């Protein structure tokens, strides 16, 4: 059996072939994106000139430690490519993201990029989104009321789901880089992701959700047979 980390690294290495000198890059978050930043740093040491916007404090620390030049979306509001992982990828390249809690910055950075390339191992590919619990980032104020409103939206969108407030391994509530909380919605199957996505945005208190609709244009999916490049259908 192929080591999952080796597959993630394969996908990351393939994504690096899309990076050219002078590019402005969005740097994703998670175990797969971490491989990309490691490999990018090796190329930077060899002389590649790029600048990156990290999508989390974890990625910022990694990139800084490895000497990848960084900028912000205030200094550099338009990026060429974002390379990021995903928790689920459907055939239209719609995604669930946010398993690591970085969904808000990830979505802002992806939306500011000319293209988003998703890197993953084949376990992330699904026919329909929803088996992975959908992360919904919420403001701490009014949490109880927001949770009830989110539950109503999920039901109306055909995917009633238990909601759980995300906690860390030590039992403390997980707080995002933006200071918010995350409700994970165990939907099982989301019949219409774009509709659910817009309805969730209509709930006051919802800061962002992990449905990435129409943002990814390419997915690089690694399996033991090699890395497959899939364009948006
Ligand atoms: O918040 C985290 C991100 O959306 C990650 O990109 C996603 O959870 C995938 O992470 P991994 O590559 O570790 O499976």
Image (cartoon, grey):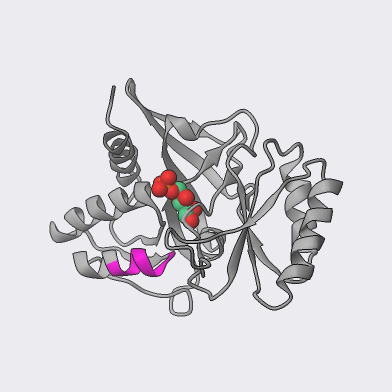
Figure check: 151 above or below 202: above
Q: Who's the residue at 23% across and 50% down the image?
A: 39
Quadrant where the C terminus sits is: top right
Across and down, in percent, residue 137 comes to 62, 64
Residue 194 or 184: which is nearer the viewer? 184
Q: Main secondary structure of the magenta part?
A: helix
Figure check: 93 above or below 107: above
Q: Residue furthest left?
A: 46
> Range of the magenta residues?
55-61
Across and down, in percent, residue 61 comes to 29, 69
Across and down, in percent, residue 121 comes to 40, 34
Q: Who's the residue at 24% across and 63% down the image?
A: 49
Residue 41 or 81: which is nearer the viewer? 41
Figure check: 104 above or below 161: below
Q: Residue furthest right?
A: 156
Residue 100 or 15: which is nearer the viewer? 100
The answer, for residue 100, to whether it is visible in the render is yes
Quadrant where the N terminus sits is: top left
Across and down, in percent, residue 113 comes to 50, 59
User: Exactly how many numbered labels are in the figure?
Assistant: 0
Q: Is residue 152 left or right of residue 100?
A: right
Figure check: 151 above or below 105: above
The answer, for residue 20, to whether it is visible in the render is no
Q: Is residue 89 left or right of residue 164?
A: left
Q: Who's the residue at 21% across and 58% down the image?
A: 41
Q: Residue furthest front?
A: 171
Q: Which quadrant of the figure has residue 140?
A: bottom right
Q: Who's the residue at 34% across and 38% down the image?
A: 11
Is residue 43 one of those drawn in magenta? no
């Amino acid at each position: 059996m192929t080591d999952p980390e080796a597959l993630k690294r394969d996908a990351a290495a393939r994504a690096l072939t899309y990076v050219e000198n002078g590019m402005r890059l969005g740097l994703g978050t998670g175990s797969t994106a971490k491989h990309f930043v490691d490999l990018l740093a090796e190329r930077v040491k060899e002389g590649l000139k790029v600048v990156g916007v990290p999508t989390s404090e974890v990625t910022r620390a990694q990139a800084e430690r490895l000497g990848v030049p960084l900028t912000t979306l205030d200094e550099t509001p338009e990026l060429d490519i974002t390379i990021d992982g995903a928790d689920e990828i459907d055939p239209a390249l719609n995604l669930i993201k946010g398993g690591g809690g970085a969904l808000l910055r990830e979505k802002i950075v992806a939306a500011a990029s000319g293209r988003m390339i998703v890197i993953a191992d084949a376990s992330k590919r699904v026919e329909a989104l929803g088996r992975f619990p959908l992360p919904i980032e919420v403001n701490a104020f009014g949490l109880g009321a927001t949770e009830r409103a989110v539950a109503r939206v999920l039901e109306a969108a055909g995917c009633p789901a238990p909601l759980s407030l995300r906690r860390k391994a030590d039992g403390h509530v997980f707080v995002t880089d933006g200071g918010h909380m995350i409700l994970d919605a165990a939907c099982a199957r989301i019949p219409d992701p774009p509709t659910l996505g817009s309805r969730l945005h209509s709930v006051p208190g919802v800061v962002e959700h992990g449905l990435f609709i129409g943002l990814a244009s390419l997915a690089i999916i690694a399996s033991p047979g090699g890395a497959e490049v899939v364009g948006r259908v």
